[in-house]
Image (cartoon, rainbow, N blue to C red):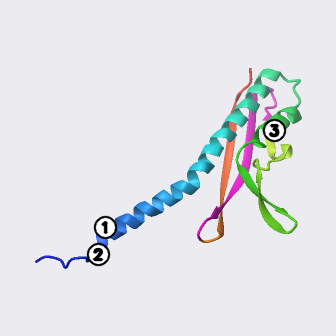
Amino acid sequence: MRRPRGAVNLVNTTLFLAVAAVAYLAWLYIPLWLDDLDVREAVSIGFGQLSSGGPSLDTARVQRAVADQLSRVGKHWEEKDGAQVEAFGLGIAPEEVVVERGTDGRRGRVSVEYARTVRLKPLDQTWTVHFHTEQEGFLK
């Protein structure tokens, strides 16, 4: 028996909606993931400075260098005059970059913990994604 012409197939509709949902989530998440790759690079550069600077290197200098790199990555939301506006950079202060040296001076760690807020376009709602990036290892 043939199906009437113009009938909707439930399986095809379900598959189409699933593909559309995955594409929408990828459209939201991929820019965040690419920015996190830039954060990983900045943390790696900070760890390299910590490693090559020797024990006399001030950790505040590494914190400022990483925060400076992150001021040019992505966008974040901040409140100005009672309204939420989008600003460049991740909005990470140098104090939020954690730089630690081991007690023996041979190990080190640089880490950044931050959150990104995404505005869901048709719903006018927000979604917050938390990231944690760190590099740890032996210092030269």
Instruction: Tell me the element at label 1.
Output: helix
**Mark 2 element type:** loop
Q: Earlier in the sequence, mark 2 or mark 3?
A: 2
- Residue 17 lies, in percent from the top left, at 41, 67
Q: Secondary structure at mark 3?
A: helix
Does label 1 or label 3 sit earlier along the sequence? 1
Quarter location, residue 16: bottom left
**Residue 117 belongs to the span the image colors magenta:** yes
Above or below, 97 relative to 12:
above
Residue 8: give its label.
2
Give the amino acid at mark 1. Asn
Residue at horizontal 69%, vertical 55%? 116
Q: Residues within 10 Å of mark 3 (few under 14, many from 20)?
A: some
Residue 131 location, x and y as percent? 66, 50
Which residue corresponds to mark 3?
Answer: 68
Lateral position of residue 21 relative to residue 49, left or right = left
**Which residue occupies 29% across, 75% down?**
8
Residue 125 to residue 114: above or below: below
- Highlighted range, magenta: 100-122
Res. 140 visible in picture: yes
Q: Disc 1 marks which residue? A: 12
Nearer to us of marks 2 and 3 is 2
3D distance between C-alphas at marks 1 and 3? 49 Å
Q: Rounded to the nearest whole Å, what is the CA distance between mark 2 and mark 3? A: 55 Å
